[in-house]
Image (spheres, helix red, strand yellow):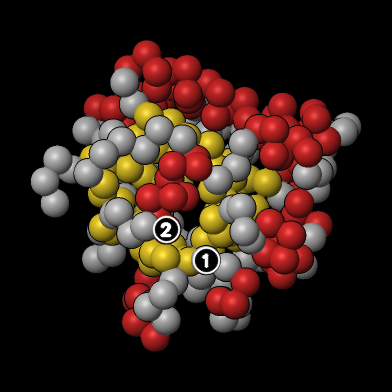
Amino acid sequence: MTNVYKFDPHTHTAESSGCSNLTANQLVESYHAAGFGGIAITDHLADYNMHMHSNWDTCIDYLIRGYNAAKARGDELGLDVILGVEIRFDETFCDYLLYGVSEDFLRKNPYLYRLGLRELYKRHGGELLIIQAHPYRGTGSPDIGFMHGVEVYNGNPRHKNRNNKTRSLCEKHPKLYQTSASDTHETEDIGTGWMEFTRPVVDSFQFKEMVERGEYVTNNY
């Protein structure tokens, strides 16, 4: 692909995900130094990450503070930073990446993680891009009728992601959208997975549209 624009759609900040050891500034500066054009901040929208906050607006304030800090630093350096979330429903240990989201949407739809995948898809499947993250890291099979795609490659080195099983799933279901990402939490994760575009990804809605139009390739090794 000419004019390659490298983009990582799955990263986490220490400000909003307790499992990450990278601040928003460290994350952005590292990706900029690695030659990336942009990243998505997909901090955790889940009860285990939200339950300590007193009300929903406080939950969202916490959830997006990493994104806001990363966006500010990205604007300074010329790295595109978009908003996404990684949601885990109360009913399962599976994780899903949501794109086509905004702060306003998150504030107006409290406690989405209590819905379950099927209800989320029923209510919001027409406006969101729902991608299952690392589908075979845990147990069970992806519920492909209620999502738009899967993370065909997850580069996090500390988990058994079983990317080969996800590739096999995509071969059987070629209409699934496929993303590729690092799932960055540590310095060693920077740039271990990415997608390639021919033009910049400026926000979450454009990312959704470009994936839906197939304007990308993945580094699914």
Q: Is residue 183 visible?
A: no
Q: Is residue 67 visible?
A: yes
List x then y, in percent, for residue 55. Answer: 87, 33
Q: Residue furthest top?
A: 76
Mark 1: secondary structure: loop
Q: Residue furthest right?
A: 54
List x then y, in percent, for residue 2. Answer: 11, 46
User: 73 above or below 64?
Assistant: above
List x then y, in percent, for residue 221. Answer: 24, 66
Circle 2: residue type: Glu
Disc 2: CA contacts within 10 A as few (<14), some (14-19) or many (>=20):
some
Circle 1: residue type: His
List x then y, in percent, for residue 214. Answer: 33, 59
Mark 2: secondary structure: helix
User: 63 above or below 133?
Assistant: above
Please name the residue shown 36% across and 38% down the image. 201
Q: In the rendered image, which residue does mark 1 sit on?
A: 148
